[in-house]
Image: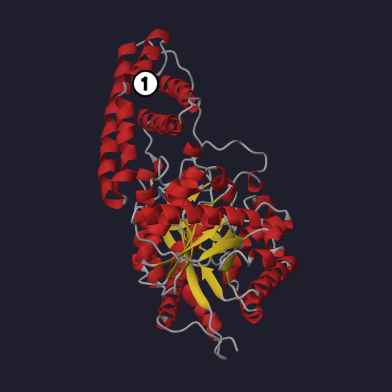
Amino acid sequence: MIEINGKSVYNSLAMGKLYFLNKEKDPVKRVKISDIRKEVLRVEEARRIAKNELRELYEKALVSVGEANAQVFQIHIMMLEDEDFFGAITSMIGMQNINAEFAVIHTSEVFARTFGNMADEYMRARAADVQDIADRLLNILLGKDKDDDKISQNSIIVASDLTPSETVRLDKDKIAGFVTFRGSQTSHTSILARTMNLPAIINTGVISAEYHGRTAILDGYSGTLYIDPDNDKIEDFKHRKKLEDERAELLRTLHGKTTETKSGRRIKLYANISYPQDLREVLANDAEGIGLFRSEFLYLENQDFPTEDQQFVKYKEVAEALGGKTVIIRTLDIGADKKIGYFNLPQEENPALGYRAIRICLSDIKLFKTQLRAILRASAFGNISVMFPMIVSQSEVRRAKSCLKECMQELKSEGIPFNPKIEVGIMIETPAAAIISDLLAEEVDFFSIGTNDLTQYTLAADRQNSRLEDFVDARHESIIRLIELTVKNAHRKGKWVGICGELATDEQLCKRFVDMGVDELSVAPSQVLKVREKIRNLD
């Protein structure tokens, strides 16, 4: 039995097969070949297999994510059939007597660079498609499986780390847990694990891929991975898993109960989601609403900018599923650690302090209004609120509200229904916003305090940097004081305040938040019943 230690980000247990996501590509060497025809036939066969794979993926995606999102696989098939691209590969093999793998890499780099330098946004976005096609061809030529197509049931995912764009492609029904070599408590792997109620550990250091496919036990309580567990460890796992399941069953008795202290102080207890698919967990855990819908994940799962209709369908689906309960949609929060190829965002030395969130939206009004119109249209089908992220000034709020008003006027003139009294809120994620929260409260209906970003900006510690884990103290007194100031200022103006960062689940601070008057807590769906239990036990 091999024991590997890391840092736990979600307390739960799992046993399954290790699945290594092959993040690091082996360098492909230039090799001189003697049989040109054989090499050309190899790459032609790889193209045939790739097209068949893509057709299967297209059919699967039609059912799971719909025509619009499935279209990317059709685009990839068309690009594989493009004789300019494929002809350049075979010409290079024939003219330079080189191996198919090297020809694929070199040609794809040339084409990706060409697309990336084009003026048209749509064409620039095709650079990422070329790279994806090249990766698929290379995997076939090298005899490797494409990672996210081949994950088997009950897999424990092992990777250096997972980006948002990678998490959206994973078949989440097959995942039993996560292990990452790097990462942080607020990384997307951690957020995904908490949403899915799955064990996860981070900062294990590099684990050899030789363990791929081996049976392992993942202990999210101790932050330990046991590879090839012995019989004693397996029996211990079964016993603890039984107790864990019994505890979960006990929590389910809180379904339908109010979230209030013994003295009668009511707290709104909402859930955070990233995808409409998360609704299953929201409903299963009896959340009273959705306090944070991370709408940027609709952009991350697309290969191009989602249309107004695409977004409207997703927002409407969530609103209708909640049956009149509150759904707070945060507008696009791209940038920093959430990169999307087709946005073509500039490289920045410090992206966390750069061009992101509301700054992008207010610089690209067409992009912003497309999303706002979709949100407004969906508001006719449920209790939707809109929330703007990364606000630092009154002028930003006023400009965002002005765009919202323009969208309302457009929809009204077009005869399209919406809720004209939709609630408007902002995220308090910076010290600047907390300090002027008295002024900001005059502009909006509510605040939602994003404690993850508030912590990193207050403590000057990048929350994505695993080396700074010991310096990122979300319970730091400065954070608590900024939260308290924000609550006081909001209440003086008659506005309600919620907390939607990881601190919302902090059992040590729960009583303090209730005492300072926080009105709402929004947590991962898996945490709802645990937080309800904690609040109901408070005096």
User: Quarter-wise, where is residue 489 in the image?
Assistant: bottom right
Frontmost residue, 305 versus 425: 425
Q: Is residue 141 above or below residue 325?
A: above
Which residue is at the far top?
A: 95
Which residue is at the far front?
A: 413
For the residue labelled by badge 1, is the local secondary structure a helix, a strand or a loop? helix
Classify the position of the C terminus by image quarter: bottom right
User: Quarter-wise, where is residue 479 in the image?
Assistant: bottom right
Q: Amino acid at mark 1?
A: Phe
Residue 18: percent from the left, percent from the top? 44, 51
Frontmost residue, 184 versus 513: 513
Q: Give the class, few, some or many, for how many residues have Cα within 10 Å of label 1's Cα (few <14, many ≥20).
A: some
- Tell me, yes or no, if residue 487 can be seen here: yes
Frontmost residue, 133 versus 72: 72
Residue 499: percent from the left, percent from the top? 58, 69
Q: Does 286 sit left or right of 398 as displayed?
A: left
- Residue tagged by mark 1? 85
Q: Does 59 sit left or right of 25 as displayed?
A: left
The residue located at (47%, 43%) in the rendering is 366
- Tell me, yes or no, if residue 4 can be seen here: no
Count of numbered labels shown in the rendering:
1
Residue 371: percent from the left, percent from the top? 44, 51
